[in-house]
Image (tube, rainbow, N blue to C red):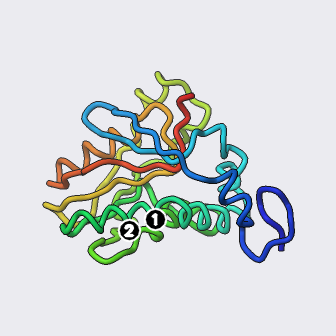
Amino acid sequence: MRCMSCQCLSFRTFCKNCEINLLAPSITKRTIGTLDVYSFYKYSTIENLLLAKHTPQGYRIFKALANITLKPFIEQFMATDPREISIVGVDEKVKNGYSHVALLTHAMKYRGTNILHSSLLASNDIKYSGQSLQYRITHSRDFIYKGKKNIDAILVDDIITTGGTLQQAQSVLLQSGVRVLFALTLADAKE
C-alpha cells in the first residue's frame, strides 16, 4: 500500500511523515450568523483529498482525516465538558457506497457522545458544488430532522463555503429544541 499523499510505501492511509508535516491540523474559526464554525484545514491545503469523496479511495481518505482531526478534538473537548453531547452530521446520505460525513461523525464516538447518524437529511438532492451564493440562497436544502429533541449537539460537515448549509441545518435543529454548540468542518473554503 502507498501513502495517499506522497505515494511512499506505507501500511497506513497516510505515512507518519505526511501526517506530521502535511496534515497537521491548523484550526480556524468563522462565525456565520450565530453559529461558530471551526475548521481543521484551509480548503486549498487538502483540496485533492477532499475531492476523493467521489472515488472509491475516498472512504479510506475521509476515515483517516477524521481520525487525525475530529477524534482527537472530541477526546480533548469531552475531557473538559461533562455534558452528554450529541453529534449530528449534515446530510449523511450514502453516495458512492458510503457517506463521507458519516465517517466524520463516527470518528467522534467517545465516552459522553451520542452519534445521531442520518438524523438530519436534505429532502432534495440540490448540489451546491461550484454554484454561486445567489443560487445557494434561492435553492434551500430543505432539511428534515428526525433525531432526539432538547439536546446539546455539535454539527459536522466536510466543507464550509458560504455557511448557508450550516445555517439552514442549525435553523432546523433549533426548531426541534436542539442547542447547537458549534459546527466542525474538515476544511474552510474561504481563503
- The image quarter in which residue 41 lies: top right
Residue position marked by numbered label 2 in the rendering: 75
Residue at (48, 65) in percent of width and height: 102
Q: Quadrant of the N terminus?
A: bottom right
Q: Amino acid at mark 1?
A: Pro
The residue shown at (65%, 56%) is 53
Residue 178: image x %, image y %?
19, 55
Q: Nearer the viewer, residue 121 or 177?
A: 177
Give the camera-side residue of 56 and 66. Answer: 66
Q: In which quadrant will I find the C terminus?
A: top right
Quickly name the residue at label 1: 72
Residue type, label 2: Glu
Q: Mark 1 and mark 2 in contact? Answer it, CB < 8 Å.
A: yes
Q: Is residue 6 above or below residue 103?
A: above
Mark 1: give few (<14), some (14-19) or many (20+) Cα within 10 Å: few
Q: Is residue 61 above or below residue 132?
A: below
Determine the residue positioned at 77% across, 61% down.
4
Lateral position of residue 126 relative to residue 148, left or right: right
